[in-house]
């Protein structure tokens, strides 16, 4: 078995449905197993997904075991020479797995690989590459000052803002939303630290990889889509969990009570909470989802037929119109939205590689959604800090 893909699911049934379809497309020609650990979801996951994906092995936890422990459950039974830890709210381009495996073959010093991540509209997510946390790094992150100086060497250290996202980089921390590593590295390190429940596991694992003499690499291409808001709500609970995770990390690896770190984080939490509350008073709350009622639907005719219940116009893209849809090197991608709210119908001859490159180059200011051929839903997110939208077909 060449590759084991491990996904921890919690209440994102239809995002996971689309994710699994992209994994199966990307795994074409690769000996792959897929293991999903469900952390006691209360949605339709258990009754909906197994019949749709008989090739996937599901583990159903009766209680929420946390992210790290659930990953370790799957890691103990995984058989692949390489392991991919993947979030359920991600979409993979068709060539991303082959790119990563080829990189490992040419870089024996690689302990783990991370991929450039984009949100649901194709905007770069800075957490794709990160630095190790210290007191000031945590303060700048939690206080929100990092947003004012996104490329500052010190202030933006948490996101390594001074390093170009366009280049292959050796980095300190990779995101657990997409992290591939050799089985030999996992066996040497023993997987995730289960003291972390929700955040910090990827920081801890990345650090231990470098301590063992390996390197963490960030790859800019082809990238993946990570809706993010489905797994990370940017509220005060998120800030608290982040705070607790950083304390666990520092206590574990620095061996002392991190007084300065704690003070910096407490101050950062106070500033973040105050600014967030003040901002809510100034802006009118907008409803989540339901961003459009008339869609431009783009893709192969056979897949567009699955979207017949959704109102809007159809733009068939088949044959010679899009020869680069299967290509890895897309230099100039057309604007596939044409400035209209768009549903991308992904299928034969119209791949996620082309769609992602189009979004990355044109940064559309309109809502976009995704539908993989044969699935029961359309998904997307206009805000990486909030919940996305699911349209059932």
Image (spheres, rainbow, N blue to C red):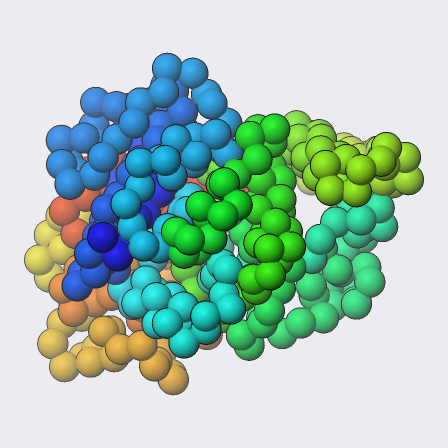
In the image: residue 78, left or right of residue 305? right
Query: x, y (%) of residue 344?
Result: 28, 58
Q: Residue at 25% of width from left, 23% of height from top? A: 46
Q: Residue at 46% of width from left, 48% of height from top? A: 186
Q: Residue at 55% of width from left, 77% of height from top? A: 167
Number of marks in picture:
0
Image position of 60 with respect to 327: above or below: above
Furthest-bottom residue in view?
331
Please name whichever residue, 84 or 126, is drawn nearer the observer in this view of the structure: 84
Q: Quadrant of the C terminus?
A: top left
Query: x, y (%) of residue 364?
Result: 46, 65
Is any atom of residue 269 visible in this view? yes
In the image: residue 220, left or right of residue 392? right
Image position of 296 with respect to 270: above or below: below
Query: x, y (%) of residue 224?
Result: 41, 59
Image position of 37 with respect to 341: above or below: above
Please name whichever residue, 389 or 119, is drawn nearer the observer in this view of the structure: 119
Is any atom of residue 313 visible in this view? no
Query: x, y (%) of residue 280?
Result: 71, 35
Furthest-top residue in view?
62
Residue 94: which quarter of the image? Answer: bottom left
Q: Residue at 60% of width from left, 61% of height from top? A: 213
In the image: residue 287, left or right of residue 208? left
Please name whichever residue, 332 or 40, is drawn nearer the observer in this view of the structure: 40
Please name whichever residue, 307 or 326, is drawn nearer the observer in this view of the structure: 326
In the image: residue 170, left or right of residue 29? right
């Amino acid at each position: 078995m060449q590759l084991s893909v491990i996904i921890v699911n919690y209440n994102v049934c239809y995002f996971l449905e689309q994710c699994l379809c992209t994994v199966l497309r990307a795994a074409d020609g690769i000996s792959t197993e897929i293991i999903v650990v469900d952390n006691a979801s209360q949605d339709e996951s258990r009754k909906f997904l197994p019949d749709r994906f008989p090739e996937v092995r599901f583990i159903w936890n009766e209680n929420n075991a946390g992210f790290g422990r659930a990953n370790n459950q799957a890691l103990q039974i995984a058989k692949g020479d390489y392991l991919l830890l993947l979030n359920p709210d991600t979409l993979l381009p068709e060539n991303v797995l082959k790119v990563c495996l080829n990189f490992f073959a040419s870089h024996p010093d690689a302990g783990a690989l991370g991929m450039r991540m984009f949100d649901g509209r194709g905007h770069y997510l800075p957490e794709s590459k990160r630095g190790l946390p210290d007191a000031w790094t945590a303060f700048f992150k939690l206080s929100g000052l990092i947003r004012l100086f996104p490329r500052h060497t010190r202030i933006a250290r948490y996101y390594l803002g001074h390093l170009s996202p366009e280049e292959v980089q050796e980095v300190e921390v990779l995101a657990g939303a997409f992290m591939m590593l050799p089985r030999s590295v996992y066996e040497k390190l023993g997987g995730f630290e289960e003291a972390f429940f929700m955040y910090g596991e990827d920081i801890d694992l990345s650090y231990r990889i470098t301590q063992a003499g390996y390197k963490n690499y960030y790859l800019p291409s082809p990238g993946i889509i990570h809706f993010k808001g489905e797994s990370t709500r940017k509220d005060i609970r998120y800030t608290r969990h982040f705070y607790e995770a950083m304390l666990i990390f520092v206590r574990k690896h620095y061996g002392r009570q991190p007084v300065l770190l704690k003070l910096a984080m407490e101050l950062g939490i106070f500033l973040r909470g105050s600014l967030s509350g003040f901002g809510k008073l100034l802006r009118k709350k907008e409803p989540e989802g339901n961003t459009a009622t008339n869609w431009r639907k783009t893709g192969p005719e056979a897949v567009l037929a699955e979207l017949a219940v959704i109102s809007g116009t159809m733009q068939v893209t088949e044959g010679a119109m899009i020869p680069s849809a299967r290509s890895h090197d897309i230099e100039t991608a057309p604007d596939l939205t044409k400035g209209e709210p768009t549903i991308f119908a992904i299928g034969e001859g119209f791949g996620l590689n082309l769609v992602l490159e189009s979004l990355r180059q044109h940064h559309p200011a309109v809502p976009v959604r995704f539908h993989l051929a044969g699935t029961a839903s359309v998904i997307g997110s206009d805000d990486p800090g909030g919940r996305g939208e699911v349209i059932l077909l």
